[in-house]
Image: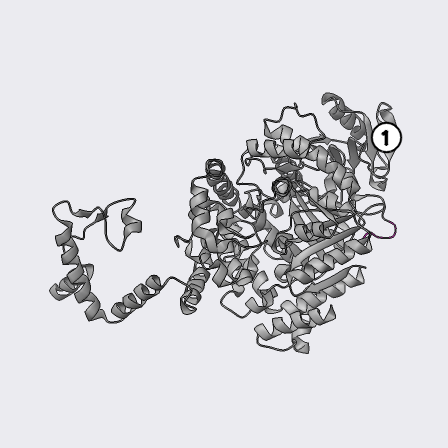
Amino acid sequence: MQPTSHAFKENAREALGNANLQKALTLMRSGFPERRAAAIARLPEFEALREEAKAIKNHVLEHLDFYLETFEQQVTARGGQVHWCRTPQEARETVLAICRRLDAKTVTKGKTMIAEEIALNDYLEENGVTPVETDLGEYIIQIRKEYPSHVIAPAIHLVKEQVAASFRATHTELDPNRRLEDAPTLVAEARAVLRRKFLAADVGITGANFCIAETGSTIIVTNEGNGDLTQTLTKAHIVLASLEKLVPTLEDVSTILRVLARSATGQEFSTYTTVSTGPRRPEDTDGPGEFHVVFLDNGRSAMLGTEFQDMLRCIRCGACMNHCPVYATVGGHAYGWVYPGPMGAVLTPTLVGVAEAGHLPNASTFCGRCESVCPMKIPLPKMMRHWREREFEKQLSPAAYRYGLKLWAFFASHPPLYQAATALMTRLLGWFGGPRGRFRSLPLAQGWTQGRDMPAPEGRSFMSLWAERRKNGDAA
Amino acid sequence: MSEARDQILGSIRRSLKRGPLEETQRAGLEQRLAAPRRNLVPARAAALPHAAQIDLFLKMAEEVQTTVMRVARVGDVPAAVADYLSQRNLPSRLVMTPDPQLDDIPWGDRPMLEIRRGRAEDRDQVGVTACFAGIAETGTLMLVSGPESPTRNNFLPETHIVVVRGKQVVASYEEGWTRLREKAMPRTVNFITGPSRTGDIEQRLELGAHGPRRLHIVLIDDEAAS
């Protein structure tokens, strides 16, 4: 999809005025954080597991070439095939070639963010293959021609009335007078419609939460069971994965799984954790006839060894966005591409460029909650600062902002000048503030004074008070 | 595509500022894979005696809307299954995997149960399977695929009944892996924790999204016997 991250400010303004979105976000704000906190309180080892999970992923990233090669050997030894793709275009072509060879008409899909990243659905459709999303949230946004607003809850921006309207518009073969007002009815209808699609599909595509080097297995984690029907009932199972999904052993992935569900939905364990190893065996009575793993690089190998390497530890749990005050206010679509929230603010500029997505690392209050809840301890705020620095260096930020910063930097690196200037400003502002002690509007700070008054400074600066205390010898 | 493969691996090595790994380093990593070591395993289940692990397994399963029934002997299973179905007004026709683990159950004691053994089809509303292990830590079932246990039987029927033996209950996922390593890695390993669910509509929990709406465990307390 075409990113609209450059229009973050407009997107955000629109989001603030969207009543349905604001209602949906209110439901999210309390739900996820409370459930996560409760789940973590029940597991005394949680912090220690986080440290171990982080160490495992760091180890993988340092030896990524070895683990990818080993994984490929294992997949091949068990009758599967690994495909290496540098770009989204290569990945799309690889998937289409498999579908064409199997003469596939419809493809069922489990939830995969990589498919969103490479805009697979549009491509398949243009080439005569019908993709059917089967995760309920993904299905809803597919029929609404939208894109996900959250990495684990793609339709979190919608309320049930919107879902009902979309079902009526799409499931035209059903009785138009049927009742559709509550969630159970909507879920039952989707189940019945999608069950027929599962049974008719030729190829099943899923993502991968993890790829296990030891066994050549891929793992998906779901609650609905859609990814299982997708891969079990079709002629071929295609797994879309990015390079950094590798994990050495089944023991290592057990550690990471313990922090994943708790961080994501606050569940002890997701309903379905499925480990898939190669195609069906000769004596099996079900399972896919072919097993393909499509690896996508798309700039990730170049992130290694940079200040953004830690981002490759991300396991897509969504905890950072669930706890982000900015995300909770504007929702995921304002970010303008497939990865929203703090992890998107770091990852999107690496994937679509800082010129397009430079606003995102600025859409942060730097409160640090994202880093504090991240199960993989990714220093998200620090990396957003790196992006701000790059944006500044590339002269992408507005001229007034850059000159303002340069001016400030000049004063800040000359302390005597800085103190003299602030003392002067303090006195001037105090004087202009008059008896009310506040400003209704300020010439260079309209953004601030539109919503509230600016209090005028009183008395002296901290620096001068501190100097006075030191001189009087009572600083200790 | 091998050109892409070489380029990607080359790019990884360039970024990591090194060439291919030295032989000694490779050997170390291969050793790490050949003899997998356990990381920290939470004490919650691992620190308990086995009888308490079974209790925890059932308690954790119930927390996620799995229903459970404990029976003393293998011979009690048919009645437990028949009662479960009749109490909920569910059909007594069921599909059962051709799993030899289910062979010693005297299904003939309940002739009302109409049992077909084989692969589940879309029309099958109730399914019975065995399992590979029960994980006490989170009330999770571990099922493996094979000619006697097709994966689709775990997902197509609306009601999934799983027969678990007490000695199959282990503390952790790691213990499950250790047991599985004694055999070959199957095509599919399913960890199942409760019936299928979704929160995709206004974050309200709804059961029965695509997989079973009901998950029922019949646990045979075979500890004393074995």
Report the front residue among A187 and B89: A187
Dividing the picture into quadrants, the one containing residue B156 is top right
Which chain letter goes with mark 1? Answer: B
Image x and y of residue A167, in percent: 64, 33
Is A310 placed left or right of B142 in the picture?
left
Dividing the picture into quadrants, the one containing residue A453 is top left
Could you tell me which residue is drawn at 48 percent across and 62 percent down? A355
Q: Amino acid at mark 1?
A: Ile
Magenta span: A278-283
Circle 1 SS class = strand
Is B200 placed left or right of A372 in the picture?
right
- Is residue A215 positioned above or below A328 on the image? below
Q: Is residue B140 magenta?
A: no
Image x and y of residue A27, in percent: 49, 36
Q: Quadrant of the C terminus of chain B?
A: top right
Could you tell me which residue is drawn at 67 percent across and 53 percent down? A120
